[in-house]
Image (cartoon, rainbow, N blue to C red):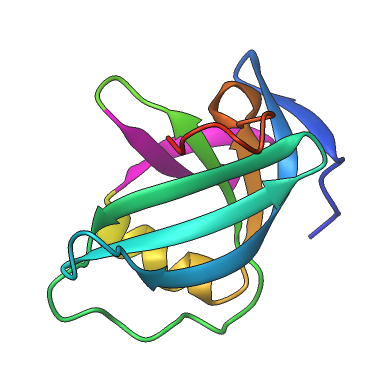
Amino acid sequence: MAPVPVQATLSGRSFLTATLDSVHRCPARSDYIDLRFSTSAGFWQWRFPEPQGRRRADRRGAVPLALTFGRYAAQAHIIRDNALGPALPSSAALPLILGDAYILIERRLIITDTGAATA
């Protein structure tokens, strides 16, 4: 897989390369998971219910994923042929993310003020 540029445009949206910084349980709800990502422009935290019967991390190789602002919540999409694929359920995206997926985050999800609340 060819490396995706730090700044990319997919389906008319602007993305930045992200690194998964931490994974932990939500302090307020133990049945939720917090993933914290950092980019060159700031950070983003994704909080979602822990999937039932969480699968092991997929270590078959770095899968390119794009995290986007969806209609009702954040969505993960596999990137195919430099385009967004269909949205994945968070329970399917989590093993890919934990398995060292190559992550792009839509620019409008990123918090640039480190003192601001997380999304």
- Number of on-image labels: 0
Which residue shows up at 64% across the image and 77% down it? 61
Q: Is residue 103 magenta?
A: no
Q: Is residue 14 above or below residue 18?
A: above
Q: Is residue 109 above or below residue 66?
A: above
Q: Is residue 82 magenta?
A: yes
What is the magenta segment's predominant secondary structure?
strand
Region rendered in magenta? 73-88
Viewer-closest of 64 and 91: 91
x%, y% of residue 85?
Answer: 47, 38
The quarter of the picture where the C terminus appears is top left
Give the left or right position of residue 75, taking residue 77 as reference: left
x%, y% of residue 71?
Answer: 29, 19
Which residue shows up at 78% across the image and 60% down it? 1
Residue 81's image quarter? top right
Q: Is residue 49 above or below residue 116?
A: below
Answer whether residue 108 is visible to the viewer in this image.
yes
Give the left or right position of residue 78, taking residue 74 as reference: right
Viewer-closest of 47 and 52: 47
